[in-house]
Amino acid sequence: MVNKLKLFIIPICIVFQLVTFFSCQVGDSQFHVFTEEQQQLIRELNGWLFPLSTSPLELTDNELSFLDQLSFAKMVALGEATHGTREFFQMKHRVFQYLVEHLNHKAFGFEADFAECLYLNNYVNRGEGDLVELMKTKMHFWTWRTEEVKELLEWMKNYNTGKSDEEKIHYLGFDCQFTTYQPDLIQTYLQPLLPTLWETAFPILEQVQDLNWDGYIDLSEEDYNTIKTQLESLEDQLTANKDQLVANSSLKEYEISKQLFRTFRQAFIVRYSYYGKTNDNTNWRDRFMAENALWMADFLGEDTRITLWAHNGHIAKDNWYGGDGSMGHHIHKNLDDLYQAVGFGFSRGSFTAVGWGESYGKWTHIIIDAPDPTSVNFLFHYAFYPNFAFNLDGVPPGSAWDNWLSEWRPILSIGAVYDGIPDNFYRVTDMRQHYNWIIYVDTTNASILIPR
């Protein structure tokens, strides 16, 4: 009788565990009826994924040892499915720490203004300034003005303490949408060394810096081309005086000054293009961000490995993004598989975004709905582990995933704005072409903003 009772109890326990598991995953009393294909996909996923504990900053090196498979990469790009998710930011912090300590990465390049990041890099490298004050006064994007990024920058500074210049790591920006800080930094370098060139540059830089959005709208194509030619000429003049400038400063200072001129010109072109006033479909911002990321790697040394931080859309190897390709697409064309794109995903929880439409005025948003049943998120949501890494390059030929990923699939992708309707933010994606890996955090929390 006892044995029979045990045999009866065991199936009941198994059923209870399954019900509890799926109830937790769904978050309500409804149950999804899985197709045979979905069941097979979830079974395969559970067998291949690399589980991660729920607190990113507490991940052990052993849990992150799968990153050793990226040891060959010159650039590892870490994405995000929103611009305001605490776990994404903390996960990227922890992954970067591993890449620095185990794979010799030397810089974290951000989707942020190059000139802005120089001030913060001075803090990271030399402890100059108050970090919170720098974040409040120098950072253009609210997205990075968070407690999570502050913790990252503090870790970078602490890592650099006591190290030689060659051993230090760097915080650099590859974005190109602002002309705020370049003129002051250029003046600091150029005026004492080559005052005649500064006198030539100043009125041109000032003219561009004074343009507001209406100024760009009213700018004729002829005037635009004139200014662009003038900016290109300034870069040429700087190059022509390289030997003199390097002799009286350093090659590093000269290269930074040249990049300041370059990103100033890029920002001028990008801002003009935002109003559709150029005659082509060139995605100038992503094209320039790729150029700047590649410059960053060369600037730090031919064999330097770096990590990039940007939205999933920018890091993806997507030749259609924005008209003529994403940043990741252009970098991949240059580096081939030495560029590795790690996308991020989630299905539920809170995040920070500018509200619009029905969510106008909100900053913190919550998604409680179950994922789109046709999406990648749906399958990830029902995996055995809530947080994990998945090697898309490692999907075996002939598997259910190999077949399923042969078509473009929806994935939840939110940027800096959100209208409160999750269905509006599923984007069809060629997962294996766009990303090498995915890091998934099922339920998230909003990033913590540092008020100005």
Image (tube, rainbow, N blue to C red):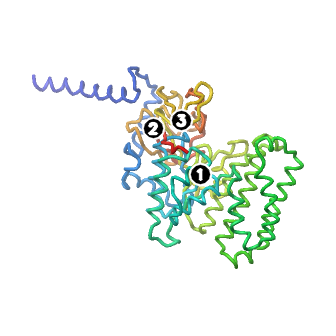
Note whether 377 is above or below 104 in the view shown: above
Secondary structure at badge 3 equals helix
First along the sequence among labels 1 and 3: 1
Is the residue under label 3 in contact with that under label 1 (CB below 8 Å)?
Answer: no
Mark 1 is surrounded, within 10 Å at the Cα level, by few (under 14), some (14 to 19) or many (20 or more) other residues, namely few
Image quadrant for the N terminus? top left
Q: Within the image, what quadrant is residue 246 found in? A: bottom right
Q: Which amino acid lies under the numbered mark 2 shown in the image of this protein? A: Asn
Q: Within the image, what quadrant is residue 273 found in? A: top right
- Mark 2 → mark 1, Cα distance in angstroms: 26 Å
- Mark 1 → mark 3, Cα distance in angstroms: 47 Å
Q: Name the residue under label 3.
A: 404
Q: Which amino acid lies under the numbered mark 1 shown in the image of this protein? A: Thr
First along the sequence among labels 2 and 1: 1
Q: Which residue is drawn at 87% across and 45% down?
A: 220
Q: Which amino acid lies under the numbered mark 3 shown in the image of this protein? A: Trp
Q: Which residue is drawn at 53% across and 29% down?
A: 374
Secondary structure at badge 1 equals helix
In screen coordinates, is 360 left or right of 320? left
Image quadrant for the C terminus? top right
- Labels 2, 1: front one: 1
Q: How many marks?
A: 3
Mark 3 is surrounded, within 10 Å at the Cα level, by few (under 14), some (14 to 19) or many (20 or more) other residues, namely some
Percent across and percent down for residue 252 are: 64, 71
Q: Mark 1 points at which residue?
A: 137
Note whether 441 is above or below 170 in the view shown: above
Is the residue under label 2 in contact with that under label 3 (CB below 8 Å)?
Answer: no
In screen coordinates, is 54 left or right of 141? left
Percent across and percent down for residue 144 are: 55, 47
First along the sequence among labels 3 and 2: 3
